[in-house]
Amino acid sequence: MRDEVSPIFPDRGKSPAKGGWLSTTVRLSSPLLLALLLSGCSDIALFSPKGDIGEQERNLILIALGLMLVVVVPVIVLTLVFAWRYRATNTRATYTPKWAHSTRIEVVVWTIPCIIVAILAALIVKTTHELDPYKPIESANKPVRIEVIALNWKWLFIYRDYGVASVNRLAIPVDTPIEFSLTAESIMNSFFIPQLGSQIYVMAGMQSKLHLIANSEGTFAGQSSAFSGQGFSDMRFDTISTSRQAFDAWIAKARSSSLKLDEATYGALKQPSLKSPVAIYASVAPGLFKTVVNQYMHAPSMDMAFDVSAGICTADGLALRSIK
């Protein structure tokens, strides 16, 4: 096919520009740019998991990113190639202003996205069940049960099996499943330990479940990942993963604390405060977590009667037969 003269680009008949500096620059700078972009990944908590759940979620992010790049990278490259190939001064490029359809292109642009969507669908179904926060983690070690209450603006951790509690410090044994039961005193919040995975929301009057595990010893940052008011930015805590012996020693030290978490102490603790220091309590009022969860679930009043036919309660204790 012979080249046609473009009425839009009158300079098409001129000799092509010398150099090729753009392609050379892109080719030489790409490895450096990629290295620069990836150099900060080691500082991102999500890409430095310290537990099995966090590692699975990291892999899921990378797989999803790779599938996205299957489309994004070719599109960016072809955009630059087409812009360079069909520039106004390139007389070797074929000019076809009446071109409108290509079956081969249609097959490519529809088949690839369909394949990617199918892969993502299968991946979502699989990981939704595998990474369910309510699903217990299989392990030879007995889980440690911890009740978490989001206060304004601090975290309270109650060690259900040990009778101790702590504020803004979470001590856990390594290679041991942690079974969290979570709620909030008032404002909805979000519990998140990035290096262990699975952020989960907590709400007043409701209980959430979360199962995590730390497979490495160390100190991992925990935080609130939902804006909850003035002290939100300082609502952080340290998650300290230690050997079982060190954890047992920490429990023994906590039991020797002079502080006790009774109802009066909790009443003062739940008041809003900023940058609350770490506190350890040697004992906890029985049923404190359930009391917080059920604080808005009042028992039916004695002067209320339920009408089966109407499906409502009447304030005067009489069954309401009809509603007009």
Image (tube, rainbow, N blue to C red):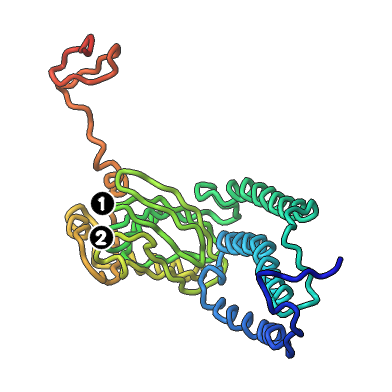
Question: Crowdedness of circle 1 by 10 Å Cα count: few (<14), some, many (20+)?
Answer: some
Q: Earlier in the sequence, mark 1 or mark 2?
A: 2
Question: Crowdedness of circle 2 by 10 Å Cα count: few (<14), some, many (20+)?
Answer: many
Q: Within the image, what quadrant is residue 191 found in?
A: bottom left
Residue positioned 54% across, 47% down in the render: 135
Q: Image height check: is 142 above or below 313?
A: below
Q: Are marks 1 and 2 in contact (CB under 8 Å)?
A: yes
Say left or right for 112 vs 239: right
In the depicted view, which residue is nearer to us: 149 or 254? 149
Residue 273, visible in the rendered structure:
yes
Q: Amino acid at mark 2?
A: Asn
Residue 199: % across, % down: 46, 57
Residue positioned 22% across, 9% down in the render: 321
Q: Image height check: is 71 above or below 20?
A: above
Q: Which mark is residue 152?
A: 2
Residue 31, visible in the rendered structure:
no
In the depicted view, which residue is nearer to us: 20 or 135? 20
Q: Image height check: is 35 above or below 295?
A: below
Q: Amino acid at mark 1?
A: Ser
Residue positioned 67% across, 60% down in the render: 67
Q: Which quadrant of the rendered structure holds the C terminus?
A: top left
Residue 307: % across, % down: 25, 14
Cα distance, mark 1 to mark 2?
Answer: 8 Å
SS at circle 2: loop
In the depicted view, which residue is nearer to us: 252 or 43? 43
Q: Which residue is mark 1?
A: 186
Furthest residue in direction left, as rendered: 316
Q: Which quadrant of the rendered structure holds the N terminus?
A: bottom right
Residue 163: % across, % down: 34, 56
In the depicted view, which residue is nearer to us: 142 or 277? 277
Q: Image height check: is 44 above or below 311?
A: below
